[in-house]
């Protein structure tokens, strides 16, 4: 089963690399040409999952720690990055409050 899943994934990568739209029919055609019997439902699910996404961008951002935004959502991603920084600042403030208890001369085990 794993080789069938890999074949569908590789077919999608081949299509993305050639700049061709990823569709279920094209995935099935490529897997059949490779001698892999792929059920059309799996090709349809993969094509739907990758619909509207830039696969090359997803691959180039694998190590960045987050999902890549869709091609049309680039402006929203920059706003989301600023929002992601805010919780980090809040965590630092909370840590400072915890440290201030130690400065008063008493602690949990005193």
Image: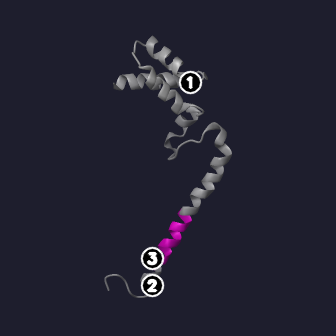
Which tag is nearer the camera, tag 2 or tag 3?
3
- Position of residue 86 in the picture relative to residue 36 (left or right): right
Q: What is the CA distance from the residue labelled 1 to the residue labelled 2?
A: 61 Å
Q: Which residue carries the number 1 mark?
A: 22
Q: Pinpoint residue 62: horizontal percent, then vertical percent.
A: 50, 40
Q: Secondary structure at mark 1?
A: loop
- Position of residue 76 in the picture relative to residue 60 (left or right): right
Which tag is nearer the camera, tag 1 or tag 3?
1
N-term mark: 1 or 3: 1
Hey, which residue is sitting farthest front in the picture? 41
N-term mark: 1 or 2: 1
Q: Which residue carries the number 3 mark?
A: 98
Q: Give the vertical position of 36 relative to 99 (above or below).
A: above
Q: Which residue carries the number 2 mark?
A: 103
Hey, which residue is sitting farthest bottom in the picture? 105
Cβ–Cβ below 8 Å for labels 1 and 3? no
Could you tell me how many numbered marks the image carries?
3
- Identify the image quadrant of residue 20: top right
Q: What is the CA distance from the residue labelled 2 to the residue labelled 3?
A: 10 Å
| Magenta segment boundaries in residue numbering | 88-99
């Amino acid at each position: 089963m794993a080789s069938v899943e890999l074949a569908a994934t590789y077919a999608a990568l081949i299509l993305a690399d050639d700049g061709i739209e990823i569709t279920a029919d094209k995935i099935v055609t490529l897997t059949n040409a490779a001698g892999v019997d792929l059920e059309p439902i799996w090709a349809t699910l993969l094509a739907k999952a990758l619909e509207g996404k830039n696969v090359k961008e997803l691959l180039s951002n694998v190590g960045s720690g987050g999902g890549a935004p869709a091609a049309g959502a680039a402006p929203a991603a920059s706003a989301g990055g600023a929002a992601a920084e805010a919780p980090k600042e809040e965590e630092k403030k909370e840590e400072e409050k915890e440290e201030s208890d130690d400065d008063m001369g008493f602690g949990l085990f005193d």
